[in-house]
């Protein structure tokens, strides 16, 4: 059985969306990804939905069963803030 870890990021909306796309997420009106990274179990926001933006800062999360490094230009979001703004799995 795999252990899952919630990974939470924030940053510029374009940077957050690009980072999620690298793992197989897609935004509104985008074609589904050919492949979702095998370590990923889910995304917040769900595929097909826009990233969540508050006061110009985008927030997202994914759940993974392998280490995922924080992409350049993004920062880790604390669990309390992330949970309050975008929810959890």
Image (spheres, helix red, strand yellow):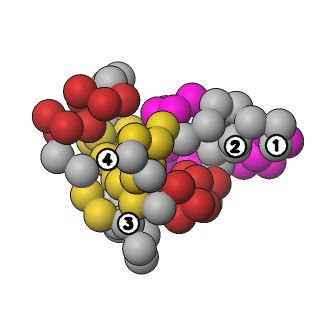
Mark 3, secondary structure of its residue: loop
Mark 2, secondary structure of its residue: loop
Query: Who's the residue at 64% across and 31% down the image?
Result: 49
In front of the other: label 2 or label 3? 3
Quadrant (top left, top right, bottom left, bottom right) of the C terminus = top left
Q: Nearer the viewer, residue 33 or 72?
A: 72
Q: Nearer the viewer, residue 48 or 52?
A: 52
Classify residue 18 by image quadrant.
bottom right
Labelled pair 3, 1 in contact (Cβ < 8 Å): no
Q: Residue 73 at what x, y percent from top left?
A: 41, 74
* Residues at marks 2 and 4, CA–CA distance in whole angstroms: 17 Å
Magenta stretch, overall SS = loop
Q: Which mark is residue 74?
A: 3
* Residues at marks 2 and 3, CA–CA distance in whole angstroms: 18 Å
* Residues at marks 2 and 1, CA–CA distance in whole angstroms: 6 Å
Looking at marks 2 and 4 on the same chain, the residue that comes earlier in the sequence is marked by 4
Q: Which mark is residue 30?
A: 1
Q: Vertical placement of 20 versus 14: above or below?
A: above
On whether residue 45 falls in the magenta region, the answer is yes
Q: Vertical placement of 89 versus 15: above or below?
A: above
Mark 1, secondary structure of its residue: loop
Left or right: where 63 falls relative to 26: left
Q: Residues within 10 Å of mark 1 (few under 14, many from 20)?
A: few
Q: Residues within 10 Å of mark 2 (few under 14, many from 20)?
A: many
Q: Residues within 10 Å of mark 3 (few under 14, many from 20)?
A: some
Left or right: where 31 falls relative to 75: right
Which portion, as a residue range, is magenta? 31-46
Query: Who's the residue at 63% across and 54% down the image?
Result: 21
Residue named by callout 4 = 8
Q: Which mark is residue 26?
A: 2
On whether residue 69 falls in the magenta region, the answer is no
């Amino acid at each position: 059985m795999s252990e899952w870890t919630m990974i939470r990021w924030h940053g510029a909306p374009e940077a957050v969306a690009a980072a999620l796309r690298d793992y197989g997420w897609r935004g509104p009106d985008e074609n589904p990804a050919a492949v979702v990274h095998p370590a990923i179990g889910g995304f917040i926001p769900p595929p097909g939905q826009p990233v969540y933006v508050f006061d110009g800062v985008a927030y997202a999360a994914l759940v993974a069963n392998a280490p995922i490094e924080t992409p350049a230009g993004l920062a880790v979001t604390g669990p309390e803030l992330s949970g309050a703004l975008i929810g959890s799995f």
